[in-house]
Amino acid sequence: MDDRTPAAAPTDADLLAHGREILRAEGTAILQAAERLDAAFGRAVRLIEGCTGSVVVTGIGKAGLVARKISATLASTGTPSHFLHPAEAMHGDLGALRRDDIVLALSQSGETEEITRLLPHVAARGIRIIALTGSAQSTLGRAADVVVPTGPVREACPLGLAPSTSTSLLLSLGDSLALVTSALRQFTHEEFAVRHPGGSLGRQLMLVEDVMRPLAQCRTARADDTVRAVFARPLPARRTGAVMILDGAGMLAGIFTDSDLARLFERRNDAALDAPIGDVMTSQPTTVLSGTRLRDAVALLEARRLSELPVVDAAGHVTGLLDIVDLVGMVPPETLEIVVEAPTAVAA
């Protein structure tokens, strides 16, 4: 007969405390690793920065999953990289290695069988090895040209077995290598944009001319055109709520919006409808230069509380119009929600 008293079920407070304990354990280990970094880290960065081939990242199990992420971070921040599965390498994938590559090998113990079996074949090709491992005295550590140690680790797992703290350390050290190398390369926003054309990041790094309405698709007028004549004209295929008033040289003289028209009606200023639009337009409107990042243009829309933003080139010629309607779904919704058209000056 079992006389043990069943343990009380953990409360929500117990679960919260345990979650915090795990985060603190992993966070503390990362902070300790930061203090342990020495000259080997700099040598590893220099090796990666000087690599004329690819940084081939390898690991197996949970370390292999981390290795894939590190490889992806390297590739997206300016360092050519790919992942090599150490077991598959022994069955033909060694052919993916070139003499000008560098191998970045991950193993907390440094004794992972699949990794240690791979090492002689890497060395035989004269390929240099950077190791992320617990000890420089491990098999992996001794075979490596540079060791960036994680140090001794106690896993945050309650059993002390499941890779948790160790994988957090490997990931953090890999990120550090990738991002410090990227900074050393003076990796630019433009280079980042080339590597991230899709998704939210890609959209934020787009240029205004990538999403603006070209001038040929915009509503335009001359300053001496009457308001009535301007609004009687056929609309472009993509309706916009702004008319850009241009001078003879194609320079922006002003802007007149649907909101401005509504205010004329609200004030019963019917006479203005047959007056030149130049009398009621907003002169010197806010503009944005071609080549501006979309995220910066959206910030300008937000700051000035505008719905339309004329785009001009370096000489001041109008090239198109950025319309808030076209940005829905392209930038975070919380940004667009507060962008509304500001009141513009209208003649009485």
Image (spheres, rainbow, N blue to C red):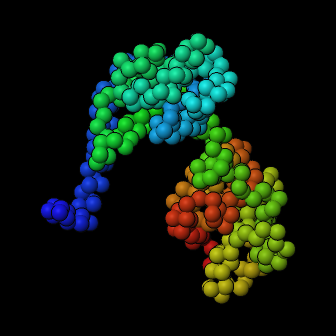
In the image, taking residue 88 as reference, residue 252 lies left or right, namely: right
Is residue 210 shown to the viewer in this render? yes
Quarter placement of the N terminus: bottom left
The one of 295 and 93 positioned closer to us in this rendering? 93
Number of labels in the image equals 0
Quarter placement of the C terminus: bottom right
Residue 83 in picture, x, y percent from top left: 59, 33
255 shown above or below 31 = below
In the image, taking residue 134 as reference, residue 189 lies left or right, namely: right
Measuring 72% from the left and 44% from the top, which residue is drawn there? 315
Residue 9 in picture, x, y percent from top left: 23, 66
Measuring 34% from the left and 41% from the top, which residue is drawn there? 161
Q: Quadrant of residue 187?
A: top right
The one of 166 and 7 positioned closer to us in this rendering? 7
Measuring 39% from the left and 31% from the top, which residue is drawn there? 108
Is residue 70 shown to the viewer in this render? no
Measuring 64% from the left and 55% from the top, which residue is drawn there? 287
311 shown above or below 231 = above
Residue 156 in picture, x, y percent from top left: 30, 44
In the image, taking residue 109 as reference, residue 242 lies left or right, namely: right
263 shown above or below 146 = below
